[in-house]
Amino acid sequence: MDNKWVIDVYFKSDKFLEKITLDWASIHFLAFGRYYFNGNLNNSQIHKKAVIKDLNLNNVKFVMTQDSLNVEYKEIKTDIFVGYKNGIEYRIPALEIIRAVIATNRFLLNRIVELDSLSKYFVYRFDDKNNLYIDFFDEYERKLLSAEYVRHLAWIITNENILRMFSQLGQNLWLEGNIKYDFLFKEFDIKARIHEDKKVVRILEIIEFKNKKINAKEIFISSKYINELNVSSEPKLRKYRSLNKTDDKILDSKIDGANNNESDFINTLDTKHIYSSDVKINRRKRNRKTLRTKEDNSTKIYEIENDNLRTTADTGGLDKTKGLEYENIEDINVKGELEEFIEIMKLLKNKKDIEDVQVIINDLPEGKRGKKFSKLQDGETNRQYVVGKIIMKNGKEFSLIEVEREEKSLSMLLLYAIKPIDWTSIYFKLTLGLVNKSGTWDSSSLKRLEMKGLYSKRIRHKSDKSSIYDKCNYIYEKILENKSI
């Protein structure tokens, strides 16, 4: 198509094989052997019996070639890398490496086809101590400043071979109209969903990419969105609150949903990237920003009726990966009922025992059919939740989950794990259970998690008459009470 990069994708059903032309950046949601429903690319699933294996393919030489797939008497050609180890042939789709390893978000996918466009968004340099400095221009969006995005960008910048692969992709797309590039990984240690036939292993989807090394001592970033926070005693100029369309303020915690038949499918998550060492990210503050925490008679109240007025640091849409992503607390701007929780988290970050606070904002999952708690009382607006991941100076981590309540009796949930844990999958399971239990934390799920070393505690909300400082200290005390778990 003119002025637009697209890709032809084949979908097979029980009866049909259909070719669909999609936007180039849509490959972020595509992988071989996934099941897609009702045209929703962002909610694909894999079969529960899918074969998933750890594969150490370090120092294996891979060469690009074409593979022919015969589907419904039609031959479909696709570019793959082929390599051999211990008499086994390994086949990796070239698009899967782009999607899951090199360009892990739509921002990078779109930069590939713009040719050398990274320099339009930032400049970088190293000092004599091998610290990496990245100065982002105004065009680089706030949502891309999350630790996950910055670390991945630093990995590309500080590894010459990875940066060369990234550049080759764009050049060959423009010059030759194909995605040819060299396989320049020295370390390729992955967990993958595979199809194994005799001595041929087809890698369908890369689930984990391990041992990523950032070749810098520390990372220093600056942006117009990174400001010094100054807590002010002056009253707020305005406050936002949700406008309820009914007077129903009663939450029935005894309602249980009917048991659904167990699905043969499970949701797939994003590719998990594991780094060989934890390189610290330092945020260099450019400007001073004032946070007003008090209210008086001069504070104007604005009532929010619909989702269009709710603002966050993220512009939404399909710009992000499908999984949950942490954002720095200083970069968050949310209006509505959850605004106070964000302000409390900002104050909490200044406590002496706390190293950092990162935040996730997301909609509650849909849950079982007939469960309505995922929507607000208007029946249309998605109910949101916020997670504050609290990193202590001793390295321990807590997570505090707050959900839009609309004045219902629902406590916050404090979580603490005694060993490293995949927090994002825990958040999904707990919020899904919350919806399925019609607004009550699922005690059976919490007990099962406790057997795996994850502890929880419900925290009731303090009175609305309490100051934001009192609420912050109250939560801080609850965290300190559980430090010794």
Image (tube, rainbow, N blue to C red):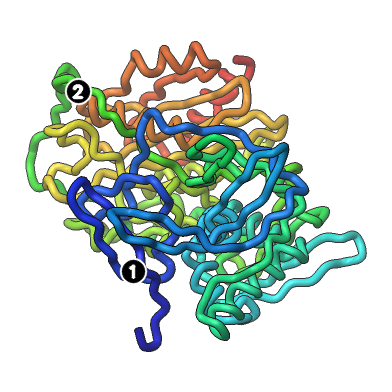
Label 2 – label 1 distance at C-alpha: 34 Å
Identify the secondary structure beneath mark 2. loop
The answer to whether residue 299 is seen in the rendering is: no
Q: Is disc 1 placed on a helix, strand or loop?
A: strand
User: For the C terminus, which image quadrant?
Assistant: top right
Task: Judge by depth and name the residue closer to the eye, 480 or 265.
Answer: 265
Residue 367 image-quadrant placement: top left
Quarter of the figure with residue 277: top right
Looking at the rendered structure, which numbered label has been put on residue 22?
1
The three-letter code of the residue at mark 2 reads: Asn
Q: Quadrant of residue 152?
A: bottom right
Q: Which residue is mark 2?
A: 261
Residue drawn 53% across the image and 63% down it: 66
Q: Position of residue 162 (x, y in %)?
A: 70, 63
Single out the residue that lies furthest toward the bottom: 2
Q: Position of residue 235 (x, y in %)?
A: 41, 56
Query: Is 447 in front, or is 472?
Result: 447
The disc labelled 1 sits on which kind of residue?
Leu
Q: Which mark is residue 139?
A: none
For the point 73% across and 54% down, the residue is 61
Would residue 197 be found to the left or right of residue 13 on screen? right
